[in-house]
Image: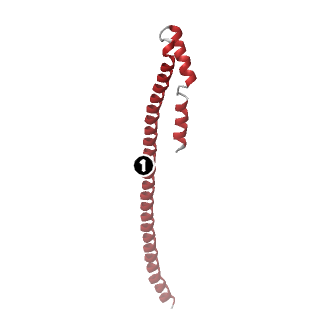
Amino acid sequence: MSVLKDTVLASIGLFEVTKARAERITDALIQKGELNRSDRKKAVLELLDKAEQSSARFRKKVLKEVDQAQSEISKMAEDLKWARETEMKKLQDNVSRLTKAVDALQKNTEATKKPARARKRKKKQ
């Protein structure tokens, strides 16, 4: 599991309702008269169950988003790699063309110098 997923899951754990917290919530409802004391245990279990379901849905949604983000990042990295390879190929082609042009110029220059040398020699003789 990635570091990002671990971090997200740890953050989600902060939102989960503990049994002690559920008991405090139900006790407050009992004190307000909104819940009968006889229903306390059932209410605590329901609260914990609902909290777990909610947490599971949230966790699933977050993991889906993290997976999607990782997938998009991987695709972007592949696209960049392809772009770099394409650019590298273009540069190599340019270098090859320039090398051929330089070679042709050197041959042309050497061919031009040879007749000039031969003429100079004839004049000296």
Q: Nearer the viewer, residue 125 or 2?
A: 2
Q: Amino acid at mark 1?
A: Lys
What residue is disc 1 on? Answer: 75
Q: How many marks?
A: 1
Q: Position of residue 119 (x, y in %)?
A: 46, 85
Secondary structure beneath disc 1? helix
Using the image, determine if residue 60 lies above or below residue 93. above
State the scheme by which the image is colored: secondary structure
The residue located at (51%, 88%) in the rendering is 124
Q: Nearer the viewer, residue 109 or 43?
A: 43
Using the image, determine if residue 42 lies above or below residue 103. above
Q: Residue furthest bottom?
A: 125
Using the image, determine if residue 75 lies above or below residue 42. below
Q: Nearer the viewer, residue 57 or 121?
A: 57
* Label 1 environment density (alpha carbons within 10 Å; few <14, some 14–19, many ≥20): few
Q: Position of residue 121 (x, y in %)?
A: 50, 88
Q: Position of residue 55 (x, y in %)?
A: 47, 30
The residue located at (43%, 76%) in the rendering is 108
Q: Position of residue 14 (x, y in %)?
A: 55, 29
Using the image, determine if residue 115 lies above or below residue 68. below
Q: Residue furthest top?
A: 33
Q: Residue furthest front?
A: 38
